[in-house]
Amino acid sequence: MKSIYMDHSATTPVDKQVFEAMVPYFTEIYGNAASVHSQGRQASRAVELAREQVAALIGASPEEIIFTSGGTEADNQAIIAYMLANRSKGRHIITSAIEHHAVLHCCDWLARQGFEITVLPVNPLGVVEPATLSKALRPDTALVSIMHANNEVGTLEPIAELAAIAHEAGAVFHTDAVQTVGKIPVDVRELGVDLLSASAHKLYGPKGVGCLYSNKKVGITGFVHGGGQENGKRAGTTNVPGIVGFGKAAELAGQNLPVRAAKLTELGQRLIKGLLKEIPHTRLNGHPTERLPGSVSVSFDYVEGESILLMLDSYGIMASSGSACTSGSTDPSHVLLALGIPVESAHGSLRLTMGKDNTDADVDRVLEVLPTIIKKLRAMSPLGH
């Protein structure tokens, strides 16, 4: 039985070229990038090349890239470090109800420190409407953090417009772009953002490495202390192999990106149309067109999401019911509830996210198997009758 992986929003496999680029920095060029000897200098040069590769992917300057342990740390630095260092600019933060917990939990922590948080609602398609942001801005709003694309339903947000509105009010704008960098064209200048978070393992790079883009004008402060790495912005021994892998993954992601995105969009739309046609009482979650390529989120009435996942897995199909960071939780998705989806339907959600190796045959297999699974589960459920 062929395995079909459709959980790319949770993580992606490391590209073979990325792995090959990393290997020498484990076994041959293993020096500390802060050392002055030849091993250290070689490692340092590799890190700076990766910085250039990542910067090129998002239209930034290399000196604006701060390497981190991943998207979560980048979000923490963007939100907590910025607010703690800029209390004089205001104590008000605006975010949205559908953010990743890496953002929402930062805001919760800051609220306990005396900062004020406004959580914006979204419309039924999962979009933060610009007018909603305009009404929420205050003279003491220091930071606005709205994600570029939602990790559960795939909806793309109008970041350029939102950032412009925030700037008019004098606020700094951060976007969690973990789900978009490497999947669709992302240019920090065109988006107009001041801070942006990204993660290597979402674009066929290794886990445990990410970055924070920080516009030179923002002057982000260090968040992890103990050394002068990353120009004093992030202490700790440099993860040379991981950063090299991130750089190579960024370089590869930039090659033929529009072509890959178009292919995934086509696969996603085929899957959506097939599911809505073949399975009654099914709803598409998120925006029908303004969504991540290859990202499909649906809710099935009268069934429970975990049972769907287990039965799909028995057929060799790997998916999720929402964010990988909340897997195992019995609570309904905060994202789906924010879209106005009833609790019962939210419990029956399924996220299928495709990647570069998925094919039409994979979509056909899901469309062959899933209707039977849902029918069987509904037959077992008292609600299904």
Image (cartoon, grey):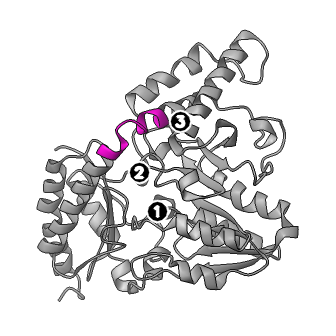
Q: Quadrant of the C terminus?
A: bottom left
Q: Amino acid at mark 1?
A: Ala
Task: Report the residue marked by disc 3.
Answer: 246
Task: Report the residue marked by disc 1.
Answer: 149
Mark 2 or 3, nearer chain start: 2
* Position in image of residue 47 (x %, y %): 64, 27
What's the magenta region? 249-259
Q: Quadrant of the N terminus?
A: top left
**Of 105 and 295, the residue lying toward us:** 295
Task: Report the residue marked by disc 2.
Answer: 184
Residue 288 visible in the displayed image: yes
For marks 1 and 2, give the CA distance.
Answer: 10 Å
Q: Main secondary structure of the magenta part?
A: helix
Mark 1 or 2, nearer chain start: 1
Q: Residue at x 69, y 31 (%)?
A: 238
In the image, farthest residue toward the top: 38
Q: Residue at x 28, y 51 (%)?
A: 262
Q: Is residue 1 left or right of residue 302?
A: left
Q: Amino acid at mark 3?
A: Phe
Q: Residue at x 60, y 43 (%)?
A: 60
Q: Amino acid at mark 2?
A: Ile
Q: Is residue 186 magenta?
A: no
In the image, farthest residue toward the right: 88
User: Pointer 1 and pointer 2: residues touching (CB < 8 Å)?
Assistant: yes
Q: Is residue 330 above or below residue 195?
A: below
Closest to the camera, between mark 2 and mark 3, is 2
For marks 1 and 3, give the CA distance.
Answer: 20 Å
Q: Residue at x 41, y 66 (%)?
A: 322
* Position in image of residue 174 (x %, y %): 64, 61
**Of 283 and 141, the residue lying toward us:** 141
